[in-house]
Every structure is written in C-alpha cells, then in structure tokens.
Amino acid sequence: MTCAEYRGLISCMTRFVHFGKQSDDLKKKVQAVANIDAAVILATKPGRRLSEIFAMLQKAYAENGFGDQWKFHHQGGPTGYANREAVATPDSSLAVQNNQAFAWNPSVPGVKSEDTVVITAQGPQVLTQLSGDWPRVIGHYQNQTVPRADMLLV
C-alpha cells in the first residue's frame, strides 16, 4: 500500500506479491475483494451520499461471503489533499462531487484492493492504472466488470 503526492493530489494504491502457488482459499479471497471493489467503485456516483455507498459496500461483502469483514478495516473514501479527506461510514452525510477522487480499500484477511479513481458523470476513471505486465483479476458487479489488480505470483 502506498499513498503518494504529485502536484498536490494524493493517490493511493495497493499491490500484493505472493511467493509460491496460490491456494484455492486465497484465490477465492482475491476474487471476492475484486468483486467488492468493483461494486463500490461503480456505486460511487456524483450526488450519492457516502452512507448510501457504504450500505451497498456492506451488501457486497455479504454477497461475496465475507459479511462482517468491513468492520475490521476502514473502507476508504474521498482522497485529494489528504490520503482520506473523509472515511466513509454508515452515517456519512457527505455527497460525491463530480470529478472527485476516491480511494476505496475493501479487504478480507490477507487480501486488499485499492486504487485512486476520479468519479465523473461518464463513470469512474482509474488514476492508478495497472501497467501492462501486472496481473489482473476481473471484479463483477450487476453485469458490469472492473479490472482490478491481482496478486503478482513469484
């Protein structure tokens, strides 16, 4: 995980390296977190309150077999001039603004997904894009997909 500043904007991202073969359990966790991350990224839309997005995030955790895991790590929120200008909670009243940057970071034991995305009226734009040689896993949410960073296997 790293957060870096460039010209005043803080961007956050997480990448994992795994040594050896991935167990089936680890593969399941990677896919679940990719699905949860896709759900929260796609649910982040201008005008939507963070509390609404957080409720959807909780539902995505449950749908992917990790119902209570959202309780053990903050889930992220808007980023920009601080690595999190606010941390989303079930009670967050802040509304998403057009062209606002977000860094969500859903996690389950041993796996986390995090990138910085700018939310636009046309949809999310990932600022911390994957390079061509980093492995990807496809997150699924309501018939939509979002490429997410997979673990680099060494």
Image (tube, helix red, strand yellow):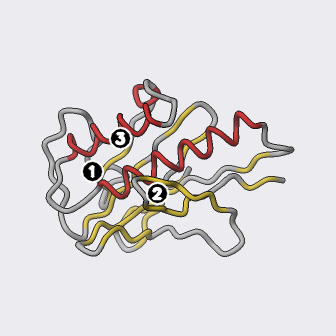
User: Residue flagged by tag 1: what amino acid is it?
Assistant: Glu
The residue positioned 54% from the left and 63% from the top of the image is 147
Does 113 appear above or below 80? Answer: above
Residue labelled with disc 2: 12
> Is residue 46 or residue 103 the one in the foreground?
46
Give the x, y percent position of residue 20.
86, 44
User: Residue flagged by tag 2: what amino acid is it?
Assistant: Cys
Q: Are marks 1 and 2 in contact (CB under 8 Å)?
A: no
The residue positioned 79% from the left and 42% from the top of the image is 22
Residue labelled with disc 1: 85
Q: Earlier in the sequence, mark 1 or mark 3?
A: 3
The numbered mark at residue 57 is 3
Quarter of the view holding residue 109: top right
Circle count: 3
> Is residue 25 or residue 132 the one in the foreground?
25
User: Residue flagged by tag 3: what amino acid is it?
Assistant: Leu
Give the farthest residue toward the front.
143
Q: How crowded is the residue under tag 1: few (<14 C-alpha within 10 Å), some, or many (20+)?
A: some
The residue positioned 78% from the left and 37% from the top of the image is 23
Q: Could you give the CA–CA distance between mark 3 and mark 2, rounded to whole angstroms? A: 19 Å
Q: Earlier in the sequence, mark 3 or mark 2?
A: 2
Q: Are marks 3 and 2 in contact (CB under 8 Å)?
A: no
Q: SS for tag 3?
A: helix
Q: Is residue 33 left or right of residue 44?
A: right
Q: Earlier in the sequence, mark 1 or mark 2?
A: 2
Q: Is residue 143 left or right of residue 108?
A: left
> Is residue 18 or residue 8 the one in the foreground?
18
